[in-house]
Image (cartoon, rainbow, N blue to C red):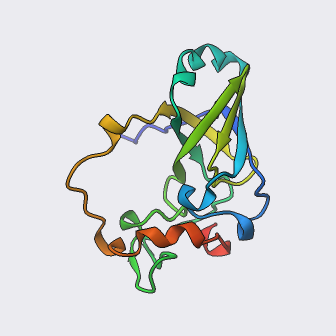
Amino acid sequence: MPEPKICFQPIGILHTPFSNLEDMPIQPRGAGGIKGELILDEQFVPGLKDLDGFSHIYLLYFFHKVTNFKLTVTPFLDHTPHGLFATRAPKRPNPIGLSVVRLVGIEGNRLLLEDVDMLDGTPVLDIKPYVPAFDQPEGVRVGWLTGRDDQAQNKRSDDRFI
């Protein structure tokens, strides 16, 4: 029996200052204060009710410039190859991105955002509120990133990532 095909339709498009990879931060930590906006398709505006009570949101989005993937990658904070699923590299079998951004305001179908680390024109698949009590587990380990996770804020992307 063939596997079912999974299809998603974007719910909106991100507009950011990043039209090329060389200027784009690699993680939201490196995008502090960078403004952007999500233009939501009008049909989804009723789904924004009460979202303005949250300071931060998760954005799930499609890495629309990614064309392939490798199962072993050398991430930007290391010189050693790691398995793809032990990294946050965007070149994935299903190129789906996840970022936590600050929700500054909502104006109709426009979500005003800060801390954006995505390319301009990125299609958004979903929005979820960030809730520390749900999303910050105790006893977290960060594997090979131990001692390096604070270096992400100074890194920028490049063509290795698409």
Q: Quadrant of the C terminus?
A: bottom right
Q: Is 82 situated above or below 124?
A: below
Report x, y in % for residue 64: 67, 52
Report x, y in % for residue 36: 72, 44
Horizontally, is 31 left or right of 81 in the view? right
Report x, y in % for residue 160: 62, 75
Q: Foreground: 28 or 83?
A: 28
Q: Report the residue at 62% width, 57% height from top.
A: 31
Q: Is 103 situated above or below 77?
A: above
Q: Which residue, as the protein is rendered here, is positioned at the far bottom?
A: 79
Q: Is 154 situated above or below 34?
A: below
Q: Quadrant of the N terminus?
A: top left
Horizontally, is 87 left or right of 15 in the view? left
Q: Foreground: 143 or 102?
A: 102
Q: Foreground: 145 or 120?
A: 145
Q: Foreground: 11 or 33?
A: 33
Q: Report the residue at 67% width, 73% height from top.
A: 158
Q: Which residue, as the protein is rendered here, is positioned at the far left?
A: 139
Q: Report the residue at 64% width, 69% height from top.
A: 157
Horizontally, is 5 left or right of 138 in the view? right
Q: Report the residue at 31% width, 35% height from top.
A: 133
Query: How many marks are shown on the rendered structure?
Result: 0
Q: Would you identify the image quadrant in which residue 26 lies?
A: bottom right
Report x, y in % for residue 126: 54, 34
